[in-house]
Amino acid sequence: QHKPTNMKAVNKILAVAMVMISSLSIAQTSVHENAKSFPSANEGMVQHIIYLPKSADRGDNNKKVEVYVGKYMETDMCNNYNLLGEFDKKEVTGKNWLSYYTFSSKGDAMSTLMGCLDNTKQNKFVTGQKLLLDYNGNLPIVIYTPEGMEVRYRIFTADTQEYKAQEVRK
């Protein structure tokens, strides 16, 4: 008589697992469906999409995302390089809550002008202007760049401890 009870438990576990898997796929589908709302990339541009995982227990409020664009360039060993370009924020037509960014650049870089003792060259990933965005696991981050550029990002999590600034009175 223990076998039917065990089968009921196994069936119950399988049912719960199937519900969890289907709800995960629905959540992922809705995020991917949102990506279809964005315009296609123009000629010579590439669309990059960042899907952030949704945080549990309102953890999204405690995070920021730093997004930057770059490309590999031949550089010397002693100067600092910065890709020239800028981000422009735009809204999806008819959906003012849904925005995306276009990074405009000709691919040129500026650098410091130190005289290098060693004339050795290196292939280095050179980045441009950075964006600091609120973390939102419900919507993708969409960036359009010229062909040949990469979009990279880092996630920052705030310390949960709060601190009070010292008051200074005259």
Image (cartoon, rainbow, N blue to C red):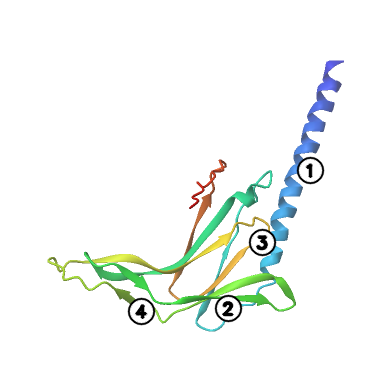
**Residues at marks 2 and 4, CA–CA distance in whole angstroms:** 21 Å
The x, y position of residue 42, in whole percent, is 56, 82
Left or right? Give the position of 49 relative to 107: right
Q: Which residue is mark 4?
A: 108
Camera sees residue 141: yes
Which structural element holds mark 1?
Answer: helix
- Amino acid type, callout 1: Val
Position of 68 with respect to 7 (left or right) is left
In the image: residue 85, left or right of residue 65: left
Among the two numbered marks 2 and 4 on one chain, the one whose residue lies closer to the N terminus: 2
Which labelled disc corresponds to residue 41? 2
Q: Position of residue 38 (x, y in %)?
A: 66, 73
Between marks 4 and 1, how big is the CA–CA gap?
Answer: 51 Å
Residue at which label 1 appears: 19
The residue where tag 3 is placed is: 139
Label 1 to label 2: alpha-carbon separation: 36 Å
Q: CA distance from mark 3 to mark 4?
A: 31 Å
Q: CA distance from mark 1 to mark 3?
A: 23 Å
Image: 61 above or below 32: above
Considering every residue shown, the one lying at the far front of the view is 170
Q: Mark 4, mark 1: which one is toward the viewer?
A: 4
Q: Could you say whether the residue bearing mark 3 is in a helix, strand or loop?
A: loop
Callout 4: few (<14), some (14-19), or many (20+) C-alpha neighbours within 10 Å? Answer: few
